Structure formats: structure tokens, C-alpha cells
Image (cartoon, rainbow, N blue to C red):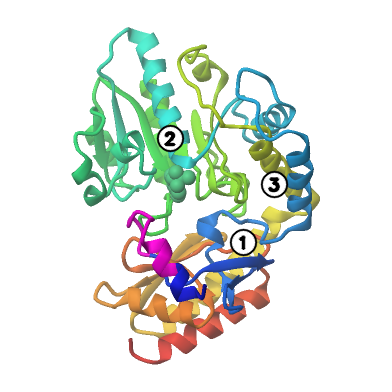
Amino acid sequence: MNTQEFITAADGHLMHTYNRYHIVMDHGDGVTLYDADGKSYLDFGAGIAVFAFGYNHPYLNGALKAQIDKLVHTSNYFYNEPAGRAAGRLAELSGLSRVFFTNSGTEAIEGALKLARKYAYLKDGSNDHEIIAMNHSFHGRSMGSLSVTGTKHYRDPFEPLIGGIRFAEYNNLDSVKAELTEKTCAIILETVQGEGGVYPADPEFLKGVRQLCDERGILMILDEIQCGMGRTGKMFAWQHYGVQPDIMTLAKALGCGLPIGAFLAKEEVAAALVPGDHGTTCGGNPLSATAANAVLDLFGQSDVTGHVAEVGAYLADRLEELAGEYDMITGRRGLGLMQGLVFREDYPLAKLVQRVIDSGLIVFTAGGNVIRFVPPLIIEKEHVDEMIRILKGCLENPV
Ligand SMILES: *Cc1c(COP(=O)(O)O)cnc(C)c1O
């Protein structure tokens, strides 16, 4: 089958929930992906901020192959060594002492919401608690996660979603205060909004939310599914701000391609969940937990976060230059290797991105008018230069 025949056959049976590019990816190596026709792509998307250490990594592949031959799955009725070890390491890195492993990001959010509600329920016995979420947030596609996702057109067709959710403006503390009630039990936000357009939290805002939560006995839930795991130049983005959440969610780069997510919580908060309250069949199975351990090993083998800070600053500078050179680009924002290039609202960005991908560079969009750069964390400055060269080539001609 050639590529077109394959795509036609696949389109005959896959649900039409994605507007996919007409490319069949075949294999990858380092920061390069190859399609089934052998064409190469410099990857500044990393499978949506997942493949932090690049493709075909010998250490990751070796760890996974060894675990496949040992034990892939057991169920959570038993202990398994990789999950226990990964939990201890994440607790150590975050200071959040309890970890629950899931299969995905959206499932980590579900767990975080359930934990917040149960914790509040145990405190006052009532079950009409409210959660404040942010406009333009993205927390996933399951019913609970969608309920706290601040893009109305994602939510509307699926209403009624879970109740008791109020939306506030991100980076606007007064707007959060305006949504507070006696019933508020948690505030959920991304430390850096990803999907919504790459908006880092303002330090004053994040500290203000922390303070509100402390004053009112409300839980602060930080979604680090995209911005966590070294992406911003610290292991967790909140470590830039001098605040610590009560609950944190992880996924994406945690397994570098193996489906694993987690929600973590402070001891006292986590104690609200007892046997029977929550579970998952495959979450944290030996294979996916081995991926998480291998990823954590790689963070220990070199100064990955230092590298991200350095190359991230270089990427930000090069994007600032582009913003200065082209009128259709209005600015740049981001943190570390999570950067967004902001285009004029009326610019046909989807067409540009198609051209960029045809030119052998993978980037994704965010928030409608932003190109999002979330490359593998091992990217080097020369890759940034090559990316800028391809992007400029595409910007020169009108789309
Ligand atoms: C991707 C993402 C999710 C959802 O994760 P899935 O693994 O796709 O379910 C949730 N929150 C944020 C911030 C994300 O970027």
C-alpha cells in the first residue's frame, strides 16, 4: 500500500475526531521523524510535548525491552517494583508525598478533582462544593476534565457536564476572587497554559492564588501535564515561582510515549482517598512505570533542566527576532522549551503550518493564532537555527 492508499483505508474506519495531516509517520531518531516515504521532519512538537528525550533513545528503548521480557502488567491488586520506585522518586522531586498513577492526562485530572471533592466532603460533610477553573484552560477530554476546560465550544455539545464549576480569567486575581464562594473547595490551573495559547502564569497571580487558597483552606491544583517534567527549565514549572500546589497532575513527558500520568498530593490531602474510592486497571503498570523510571534516570544522567534553560532562552531570543522582522507576528511568550509565536488574529495560520510541515518542520498551533514550540528537551541551538531557517523560508511568501 502506498501512503495515499493507507490513508484512505484508515479513514474508512477511524472515527473522524482529528484533522490529521496527510502523513504516515514511520520511525524517528533523535529530533527527527521519518514518514513512510522516507521524508524527514525536524520535530518541534515532540508528539505534543511528550517525547522529551527524542526518538529511538537507546537507554529508554533498552529499559522498555528488558521490562517487556520480565513483566508488562499485574493489576493494582499487587505491588510492582517500577511503580513503587517511580512514586518515591516523584515524591522526592516535588515534595508531594503521595502519587496515584493513571493512563493519561485527562485521567490524572479526574483523580485530582475527585480527591479535592472528597477532601472537602470529609471536612464539612456537604456535597455541593465548587471548583474554580480558568478561561482558555485545557485539562483534557473526559467529562470531568472537560468540565474544567475553559473553552466553551469544547464543552457545549457535551453538557450537562459536572456541576459546581466557575470560570475566572487567568492572570487576573480579582476575577478569581469574584468567583470565590463559601463552597469553593479548589482552584485548578495550568502553571503555563499550553493549548490555550502558551501563557505563563504571572508570578504575582500564582502567588496570589496560593495565598487565597491558604487563607480560605482551599486546595490549589496545578496541572503540569504539559509544562512539567523539565519542559520549562525546572522539573516542575511551579518551582520557578516559589509556590507549591496541594495537588499536581502529570502525564505527557512522564512516560516519553508510554501512556502514564499521575496525580500527586500532600500527605494530609491524599489521606482523603481510601480503598474503594478510586482505581484504574492499567495505571502505573510495570511497563509504563518503567518508562517513567527511565525518564527520571535520564534527568539524573545530565543537567537536562540546565540545558532546557539555556536552549530555551536561545529559542526565545530567535523567536523575538522573528517577531521583530515580520508584521504578521505580534509577539512571543513562553517559558523554557515551551514557547509560542503569536500571529495577527486575521493571519491564515493553518495554511502556514501546512506549508511548514510540507517543508519538513513539525510545529503545532495553540489558541488559534499561536505557533507552539515544544521540541524534545535534548534539542540543540543548531536545531533552533535550522528551525528558524525553515520557518523564515515559509514566511517569505504570502499564504
Ligand atoms: C494534554 C493535556 C491534558 C490531557 O492529557 P491527555 O493525556 O491527552 O489526556 C491535560 N492538561 C494539559 C495541560 C495538557 O496539555
Residue at the spot x=42%, y=91% of the render? 396
Question: Which quadrant does the C terminus fall into?
Answer: bottom left
Residue on which disc 2 sits: 109
295 or 191: which is nearer to us? 295
Label 2 amino acid? Ile
| N-term-proximal mark, 1 vs 2 | 2
* The residue at label 2 has a CB less than 8 Å from ligand 1: yes
As drawn, the residue found furthest toward the top would be 125
Vertical position of residue 319 compared to residue 78: above or below: below
* Disc 3 element: helix
Residue 353 sits in which quadrant? bottom left
| N-term-proximal mark, 3 vs 2 | 2
* Disc 1 element: loop
User: The magenta stretch spans which residues?
Assistant: 7-19
Residue on which disc 1 sits: 376
Residue on which disc 3 sits: 295
Q: Residue 140 location, x and y as percent?
A: 39, 44
Q: Residue 316 location, x and y as percent?
A: 53, 69
As drawn, the residue found furthest toward the bottom would be 397
Label 3 amino acid? Val
Q: Is residue 203 visible?
A: no
Residue at the spot x=67%, y=30% of the render? 83
Q: CA distance from mark 3 to mark 2?
A: 21 Å
326 or 68: which is nearer to us? 68
Verify whether residue 259 appears in magenta.
no
Residue 41 sits in which quadrant? bottom right
378 or 292: which is nearer to us? 292
* Label number found at residue 83: none
Q: Residue 207 location, x and y as percent?
A: 44, 39
Marker count (numbered)? 3
